[in-house]
Amino acid sequence: MEEEMHEQQDITAIFDHYRVSARSIWNTAFWPDPQLREWDFIDAFDDIQRILFDSLVLSKIDKEFSTEHLFRKAIPFIHISPSAGRCPIMIQNPRGPNMTGYWDDPVNQISASHVKMHFIDFFDWNRMAVRDFHYYHVSITRFDEHPHLVGREALIETHYVRALFDSE
């Protein structure tokens, strides 16, 4: 399958700057704060994260995305792409209509030329602990080798991929 050619800008450095900034704020200012109830400080940080992402990423690429949908829906103009060859991935493997938290689909490798993924969020296994934003949380929008996985979400370690801005 041949994909339309669009001009893409590598914005990995912009994403890395945001990632370092956001995790620093969480790890030094929010975790742990005994004055806040556990979910209260997560909600407060989520609000700050949206503002930070808008200021440190979206404004730099001169794009807007609804803060209501930010970190909840895939951003169609930001692609996450393997930086070289094949790389590991954990693909959502739903067990039922309301059971989506499993990341153990048997397909666990991807290559840049066969898959297209859009950024949703950063992911760490424990939202109540020190955070690293170790994974990109993505939506698979094309997967030539496994078309049945299109529409699924996945986790991929940040050091295996690049963030790309599609200016179209």
Image: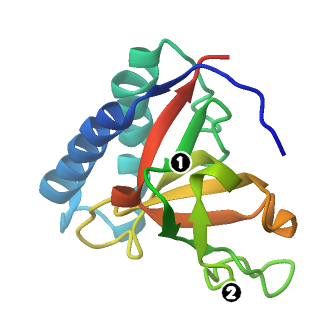
- How many numbered callouts? 2
Left of 62 or right of it: where is 30?
Answer: left
Left of 117 or right of it: where is 15?
Answer: left
**Residue plotted at (60% across, 78% down):** 108
The colouring scheme, among rainbow, by chain, secondary structure or one colour, is rainbow
Element under disc 2: loop
In the image, 29 versus 38, the foreground residue is 29
Identify residue for label 1: 81
Residue 62, how many percent across, how many down?
Answer: 49, 12
Identify residue for label 2: 106
Left of 144 or right of it: where is 71?
Answer: left
Residue 158, quarter of the rendered image:
bottom left
CB within 8 Å, label 2 to label 1: no
Three-letter amino acid code at disc 1?
Ser
Three-letter amino acid code at disc 2?
Pro
**Residue plotted at (63% across, 37% down):** 75
Residue 85, how many percent across, how many down?
Answer: 49, 60
Residue 4, quarter of the rendered image:
top right
